[in-house]
């Protein structure tokens, strides 16, 4: 699947929910979000985000898929970076991926403590800030921390969408934020979350 920016995503389909001109600012933000189900490594966007670990040396899940698809040059660049603390983000080239860049961020291992949500929010904020510094206009996120790190997808999707909307509000250079969900279940949860937040 090659992502085509003209494909109409769910958020765009919901856009007429804001017909009032007083909602122009808000509607412009919602129009920049899209949810899709599929493999993030196939997306032709400026940057995809990796849910990495603090070593940045690869792993399972989406991290493993990204390293496999990008090729061994990615691991070599990651070794030079020397790791990444939880909540922060680092950028590399995309190598053999259709995406030009990979933004590696490290989500929290879910513990049920208040620090979880702060750290997960930091992942989205710091990834988007790096996007800004690198002239990245289109960016795709997986569900950071929602695999082996155990973050409940309902809570995580709210943080992902709210943090992205806040960022778009003050940073208009981002043209599109995609949420790429591997499973139909997670896709449905994101669609549900966006529907609730828009209501
Ligand atoms: N495209 C999009 N989403 C994917 C893909 C893919 N190709 N593959 C998996 N997912 P996880 P985490 C989804 O476990 O919880 C790694 O070993 C997956 O279904 O990849 O942040 C790292 O090295 C899930 O919903 O990341 C770390 O050690 C989501 O991506 C650790 O896992 C995130 O699941 C990070 O754990």
Image (cartoon, rainbow, N blue to C red):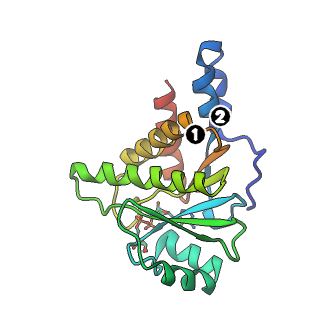
Q: How far apart are marks 1 and 2 (CA)?
A: 14 Å
**Image point 38% across, 59% down: which residue?**
87
> Can the viewer see residue 163 in this picture?
yes
> Can the viewer see residue 20 in this picture?
no
Vertical position of residue 107 compared to residue 61: above or below = above
Along the line of sight, which residue is nearer the eye, 146 or 125? 125
Q: Residue placed farthest to the left in the image?
A: 113
Drawn side of residue 127 relative to residue 138, left or right? left
**Image point 47% across, 30% down: which residue?**
197
Q: Where is residue 191 in the image (x, y as percent from the top left)?
A: 53, 40
Q: Quadrant of the N terminus?
A: bottom right
Give the mark toward the camera: 1 or 2.
1
Q: Position of residue 142 (x, y in %)?
A: 52, 58
Q: Position of residue 30 (x, y in %)?
A: 60, 33
Vertical position of residue 113 compared to residue 81: above or below = above
**Image point 67% across, 34% down: which residue?**
12
For label 1, the crowd category at 10 Å Cα-Cα, with few meaning under 14, some 14 to 19 and many 20 or more, is few
Q: How many numbered marks have been drawn onto this rendered protein structure? A: 2
Q: Residue 31 carries which label?
A: 2
* Residue on which the image places disc 1: 171
Secondary structure at numbered mark 2: helix
């Amino acid at each position: 699947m090659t992502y085509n920016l003209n494909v109409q995503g769910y958020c765009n389909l919901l856009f007429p929910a804001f017909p009032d001109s007083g909602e122009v600012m808000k509607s412009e933000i919602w129009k920049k979000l899209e949810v899709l189900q599929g493999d993030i490594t196939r997306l032709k966007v400026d940057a995809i985000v990796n849910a990495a670990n603090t070593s940045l040396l690869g792993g399972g899940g989406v991290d493993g898929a990204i390293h496999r698809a990008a090729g061994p040059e990615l691991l070599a660049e990651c070794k030079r970076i020397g790791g990444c603390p939880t909540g922060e983000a680092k950028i590399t080239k995309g190598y053999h991926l259709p995406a030009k860049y990979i933004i590696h961020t490290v989500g929290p291992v879910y513990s049920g403590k208040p620090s979880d949500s702060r750290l997960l929010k930091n992942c989205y904020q710091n990834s988007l800030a790096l996007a800004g510094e690198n002239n990245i206009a289109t960016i795709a996120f997986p569900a950071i921390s929602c695999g082996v790190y155990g973050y409940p997808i309902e809570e995580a999707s709210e943080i992902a969408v709210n943090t992205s909307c806040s960022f778009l509000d003050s940073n208009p250079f981002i043209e599109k934020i995609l949420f790429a969900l591997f499973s139909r279940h997670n896709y449905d949860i994101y669609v549900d979350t966006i529907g609730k937040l828009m209501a």
